[in-house]
Image (cartoon, rainbow, N blue to C red):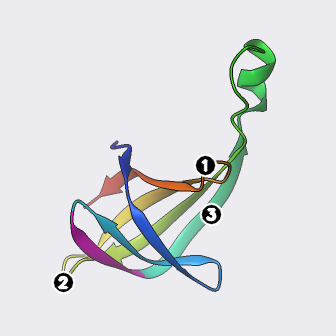
């Protein structure tokens, strides 16, 4: 698990490339996509700021020859992307 910020390029609304730790990764295919909300957290902690939706993409990608699986998280409210997990 990481939580590192990444820069993501989209093609037709899907991640096509991303930069993580200074390396450019090319997405070969999308394995899964899901959206979560943090409504449950706000219900328990009304003083906390609204969390909004988070969109997750599990992708197969490569910086060169080695292929790995990476989980990208998009915080829609903030417009930021993070790398949540990596399986190499």
Q: Quote the CA–CA distance across marks 1 and 2.
A: 33 Å
Binning the other alpha carbons within 10 Å of mark 2 as few (below 14), some (14 to 19) or many (20 upward) gives few
> For the N terminus, which image quadrant?
top left
Q: Could you tell me how many numbered marks the image carries?
A: 3
Residue at x 69% of width, y 19% of height? 48
Q: Quote the CA–CA distance across marks 3 and 1.
A: 19 Å
Residue at x 66% of width, y 57% of height? 34
Magenta stretch, main secondary structure, is strand
Q: Nearer the viewer, residue 70 or 38?
A: 38
Q: Which residue is mark 3?
A: 33
Q: Which residue is mark 1?
A: 78
Above or below: residue 65 compared with residue 4: below
Binning the other alpha carbons within 10 Å of mark 1 as few (below 14), some (14 to 19) or many (20 upward) gives few
Residue at x 58% of width, y 66% of height? 32
Residue at x 45% of width, y 57% of height? 71
> For the C terminus, which image quadrant?
bottom left
Q: Earlier in the sequence, mark 1 or mark 2?
A: 2
Number of the front mark, 3 or 1: 1
Question: Label for residue 52?
Answer: none
Residues at marks 1 and 2 touching, judged by CB atoms closer than 8 Å:
no
Q: Earlier in the sequence, mark 3 or mark 2?
A: 3
Percent across and percent down for residue 74 are: 57, 55
Binning the other alpha carbons within 10 Å of mark 3 as few (below 14), some (14 to 19) or many (20 upward) gives some
Residue range of the region highlighted in magenta in the rendering: 22-27
Q: Which residue is mark 2?
A: 65
Percent across and percent down for residue 22 are: 21, 66
Q: Is residue 68 magenta?
A: no
Percent across and percent down for residue 43 are: 81, 19
Q: Quadrant of residue 39?
A: top right
Q: Earlier in the sequence, mark 3 or mark 1?
A: 3
């Amino acid at each position: 698990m990481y939580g590192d910020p990444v820069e993501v390029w989209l093609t037709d609304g899907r991640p096509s490339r991303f930069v993580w730790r200074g390396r450019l990764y090319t997405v070969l295919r999308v394995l899964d996509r899901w959206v979560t909300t943090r409504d449950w957290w706000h219900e328990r902690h009304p003083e906390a700021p609204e969390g909004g939706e988070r969109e997750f993409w599990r992708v197969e990608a490569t910086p060169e020859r080695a292929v790995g699986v990476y989980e990208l998280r998009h915080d829609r409210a903030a417009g930021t992307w993070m790398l949540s997990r990596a399986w190499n």
